[in-house]
Image (cartoon, grey):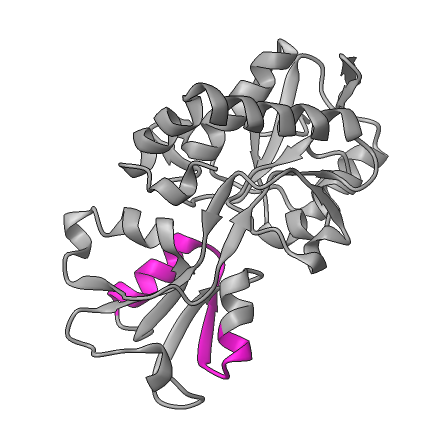
Amino acid sequence: MHLFTLFRACAMPATAVTACLLAGCAPPGQTVRGVHLVARGTLTTCTHLPYAPFQFQRGKAIVGFDVDLIDLVARRLGVRQKIVDTRFTAITSGEVFAVAACDVAAAGMTISPQRATAIDFSRPYFDSGQVLMARRDARIAPDSLGPGGVRVGVVVGTTGQAYARRRGWQTKGYENATTELDALRTGQVDALVQDDPVVRYWLTDEANAGFTLVPGLLTHEQYGFAVRKGHNPALLRLIDDVIARIRRDGTYRRTYERWMGPMPPESTG
């Protein structure tokens, strides 16, 4: 049994990963330039699919903004990137690192004090925030939502869910962004809370022409990549160095515009 799934949209339960490790089927690992890797010749990335435009499946390949950035980290190490799809909460809790399922997590993940108690974050690499998406004719605004009436879709374990709960909104939780969007399309919910760049990406699809982004950011957040808490400082330094370099040499802008269109001035820092 091989521990990792490459370019597949199916998650391995944490219990299965643990059983594999106890059975002695974990890969031998490798240390490259001071960076410990769980599998020889690869930088193994845990993510939670789909989350376009950051990571999603296109044909048989997993592509996206986060994928491109971690590819640059792998290139610096002289290895290839391997992607593992898993539960988002298994990433934010540090569970995926504790069972040696991956070296780094890249999942469009907001840096937060709570998550930082379980995982080590890189320097911020993306500015984001929560927004509402609803039908164009729904006349929904943040101040009009309350504990009853309007149903709001959220993805379980996200900062969007946490925000909606703090506001006292009536929420329905979904496993990933695609099932959340499908819930809005089919009328299971009246609106959804999601990250601004994800909603903007969805709205480029003609299938979503009947929906709109409710004006105004609900929160201001920054994304970070993550590694095992206290166990891989060399990898964390390398990721930080790559982020700093690509911002200086224009690679960040080119990658951003490949996946999201023109980059606003405030995103250049």
Q: Nearer the viewer, residue 143 or 151?
A: 143
Q: What is the x, y in percent for residue 182? A: 31, 60
Q: What is the x, y in percent for residue 126? A: 48, 42
Q: Quadrant of the N terminus?
A: top right
Q: What is the x, y in percent for residue 37? A: 74, 22
Q: Quadrant of residue 70?
A: top right
Q: Nearer the viewer, residue 93 or 19?
A: 93
Q: What is the x, y in percent for residue 179? A: 39, 58
Q: Is residue 242 above or below residue 179?
A: above
Q: Residue furthest top?
A: 78
Q: Is residue 17 visible?
A: yes
The magenta-colored residue range is: 164-186
Who's the residue at 53% across and 77% down the image?
A: 165
Who's the residue at 65% across and 13% down the image?
A: 77
Q: Is residue 177 above or below residue 171?
A: above
Q: Is residue 26 above or below residue 74?
A: below
Q: Was residue 174 drawn as part of the magenta stretch in this picture?
A: yes
Q: Nearer the viewer, residue 72 or 155?
A: 72
